[in-house]
Image (tube, rainbow, N blue to C red):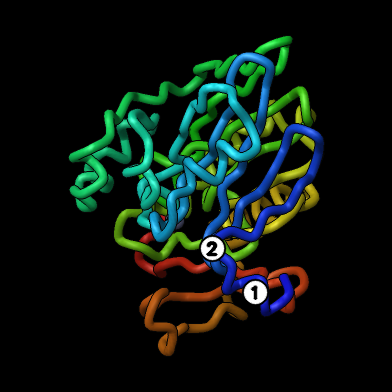
Amino acid sequence: MADEKVFEPFFVTKLTDHTFIFNERGSSSSVLVIGSKQALVVDTLNGWNNCRKEFQKYTDEPLFVVNTHAHCDHIGGNIYFDEVHINYDDLPLLKTFPDSLKVTKVSPLKIGQIIDLGDGHEVEVLSCKGHTQGSVVLLDRYDKTLYTGDAIIAHEWLQLPEATTVETYYEELTKLMPYRHCFDKIISGHGCGYEDASLFDNIYAEVKKILAGDTENDVKLTDDPYAGECMVRLYGDPDKGNRILYQEDKIR
Ligand SMILES: [Zn+2]
């Protein structure tokens, strides 16, 4: 992303005639997927600006709003909506941000739930615990795309207190393998475009190696105020920010 763009409230990227990404000042991203019956909103950014108004510049359809997980840069804009949907396993985390709960109805997002956008365009909710206890990914077979929030992202954070063990994350990725042929690209929660689905394969392979004890090249991270102290594992192209953060005592 060009530097000057980070000063705009929303940096909008059009991917298809019905798919848009909204990045908020270089921080997190929302995806808007417009169907004939309703439009899907994947995450609501930080709440710095009224994202609902921005989305409604692109569609008149009702908005079905999903939080992939309950981190502040994915739920902050909930305050602009009457109703949002989240996996209730992340409700304890969501309650640590009480402001959004005052004005917004929080409805359960069920694993296996189908979000019908109309005319055969359906999106399925799948579990992907790891980054948080209630993280989900959304499978769009129509567009062969997986919307992942922070659950499958180049810089995968498993070191946070609210994360699962590395082993649980691996088990969750394993459960997604039967769906792997249904998507060939990923839109994660901090990008401005498609990423190749090989990102899934690469993270899966690296997490498997961590579980197998192949960690001698991983190093301790001590100087990142946001990430905290943890182990960092580099993989693939480090210039693309490819790294997995985890705690040595939370592998299993
Ligand atoms: Zn997150």
100 horizontally vs 63: left or right:
left
| Label 1: which secondary element | strand
15 horizontally vs 8: left or right:
right
Query: Does ligand 1 reach within 8 Å of label 2's beta carbon?
Result: no
Residue farthest to the bottom, as pictured: 223
229 horizontally vs 31: left or right:
left
Quadrant for ligand 1 reads bottom left
> Mark 2 or mark 1, which is nearer the start of the sequence?
2
| Image location (x, y in percent) of residue 185 | 77, 43
Label 2 environment density (alpha carbons within 10 Å; few <14, some 14–19, many ≥20)? some
**Residue type, label 1:** Leu
1 horizontally vs 98: left or right:
right
Q: Quadrant of residue 3?
A: bottom right
Residue nearer the viewer, 96 or 83: 83
Residue topped by disc 1: 234
| Image location (x, y in percent) of residue 116 | 60, 14
Q: Is residue 219 above or below residue 190?
A: below
